[in-house]
């Protein structure tokens, strides 16, 4: 499936959840509702997937990805009044740690759904070639 089409389908599912539930619930409610919609749309979605952060071959941290769709798109969900810089840094770090190509940061905490799409600029191949990472915070 083309990544742009997959991203479009995921965002459509997010809007369905937002329109039906509105704002005001905790993040886990939106996560569970979104997984239902994604499954009904025929998409494979893994929730609370444990992932590790490595440094020089050693595990230095663990985290749980909210949702990974079709092993291609990482979703980080929020239910807050506004997206903050630390939320952006979080998803960028998750993309860097996992090597997943696309990330969506989705906030269900406002009356109008907020989302940001990120491409993974930290691919291992470019880092191995000696390119410098860009600061993102």
Image: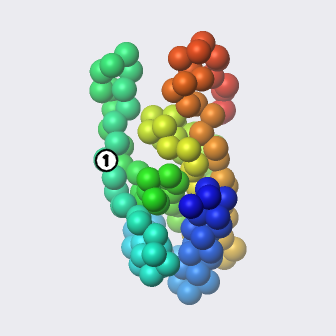
The reply, left or right, for residue 62 in relation to residue 82 is: left
| Colour theme | rainbow
Vertical comparison of 20 with 95: above or below = below
Please tell me which residue lies in front, 100 or 116.
Answer: 100
Residue 114 rendering spot, x and y as whole percentages:
67, 64
Residue 93 rendering spot, x and y as whole percentages:
51, 37
The reply, left or right, for residue 53 in relation to residue 8 is: left
Vertical comparison of 122 with 119: above or below = above
Tell me the quarter of the picture where residue 111 sits: bottom right
**Residue named by callout 1:** 50
Is residue 22 visible in the rendered image? The answer is no
Secondary structure at numbered mark 1: strand
Residue at the limit of the structure toward the bottom, as seen here: 20
The residue located at (50%, 43%) in the rendering is: 100
Residue 82 rendering spot, x and y as whole percentages:
64, 59
The residue located at (46%, 70%) in the rendering is: 43
Q: Quadrant of the C terminus?
A: top right
Is residue 126 visible in the rendered image? The answer is yes
Tell me the quarter of the picture where residue 33 sits: bottom left
Residue 136 rendering spot, x and y as whole percentages:
66, 32
The residue located at (34%, 36%) in the rendering is: 52
Q: Quadrant of the N terminus?
A: bottom right
Vertical comparison of 50 with 38: above or below = above
The residue located at (58%, 81%) in the rendering is: 16
């Amino acid at each position: 499936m083309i990544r742009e089409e997959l991203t479009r389908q995921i965002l459509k599912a997010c809007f369905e959840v937002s329109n039906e539930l509105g704002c005001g619930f905790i993040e886990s409610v939106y996560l569970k509702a979104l997984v239902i919609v994604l499954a009904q749309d025929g998409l494979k979605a893994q929730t609370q997937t444990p992932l590790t952060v490595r440094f020089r071959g050693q595990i230095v941290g663990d985290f749980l990805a909210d949702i990974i769709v079709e092993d291609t798109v990482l979703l980080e969900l929020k239910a807050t009044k506004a997206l903050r810089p630390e939320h952006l840094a979080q998803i960028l770090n998750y993309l860097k740690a996992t090597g997943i190509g696309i990330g969506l940061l989705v906030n269900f905490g406002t009356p109008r759904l907020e989302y940001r799409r990120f491409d993974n600029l930290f691919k291992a191949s470019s880092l191995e070639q000696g390119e410098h990472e860009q600061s993102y915070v």
